[in-house]
Image: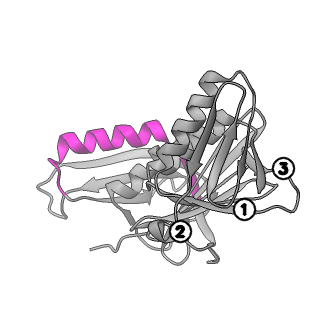
Amino acid sequence: MSDLVITSPRLFLETLETIRKFVPGVKFVVSNKGTGIHFKTTISRIVANTNSCKTETPDDVCEFSLDDIQKLVAVISTITQKENTPQINFKFNGSTLIFNETLIKLKLLTSKEEIIATYIDKPITTTLVPICSFDIKAKTVGEILSLVSSLFNNSVLKFQIMQDETKPNMIYVKIKASESSMTNEIYLHIANVLDGGAFENKVIIDAERLGFARYFGTDEVRFSVTNNNVLLLEANKEFGGATSNFTLLTSLLKSD
């Protein structure tokens, strides 16, 4: 039997809600330092780490899977509504999450790992070297995608992230439906370089990859163009001394 504590129900809920935007179910690995979750989609690998949920015993590490994260969201939301408490204590007996609060008692059966094998990822061991890093505001991403839907009539588009030729510290996105001159085109400043130098190759993504920046629920997301043709996204959340960190890896698209 493992004793666990959610030290910041609000942040843990926000973390779960972020993960739900990517996949319906995940595997949780909980230690005394926090919770680690490695998961994947068809085009990305994501790591979520948070110290808002941990085991109470220093050497205790427990693992459990849920095929529907929404069930845990519902349990925690209900407890926070019923109980006036800054943290939630619960137990894991190897198959069930057990919540025994003053006003409400709940049991949540966990899932077999093989049921969500499609979403479970191994720890990322790839060494990535950032070539250029910049922060993009989630609001800016929303504006870009809204403008794209108005101008391009659901066309399959490629977004080229590029540095201005005369001002290399400025990052722009260039969007066209084709290489033809007879098409709508967007060339929009989206960020300034924080660290690094010039891109070695063309940086091409699509609307889905760009849209990931809105999933984290943060004001801005750190983008890093790295070696191995990989784009790295990083986002951090904090509440009441607890933190959640997200790292996403996705491949760049080939240029025409």
Specify whether residue 24 is painted magenta: no
Q: Pick the quarter of the image with the C terminus.
A: bottom left
On residue 53, which mark appears? none
| Residue at position x 45%, y 36% in the image | 139
Quadrant in the rendering for residue 14: top right
Q: Position of residue 12 (x, y in %)?
A: 64, 41
The stretch of residues the image draws in magenta is 133-155
- Tell whether label 3 touches label 1 (CB within 8 Å): no
Q: Residues within 10 Å of mark 1 (few under 14, many from 20)?
A: many
Q: Position of residue 86 (x, y in %)?
A: 75, 28
Q: Residues within 10 Å of mark 2 (few under 14, many from 20)?
A: some
Q: Which residue is mark 1?
A: 62
In the rendered view, does 11 fall on the left or right side of 205? right
Of residue 236 and residue 20, the one placed in the foreground of this image is 20
Q: Pick the quarter of the image with the N terminus.
A: bottom right
Of residue 168 and residue 132, the one placed in the foreground of this image is 132
Of residue 233 and residue 130, the one placed in the foreground of this image is 233
On residue 56, which mark appears? 3
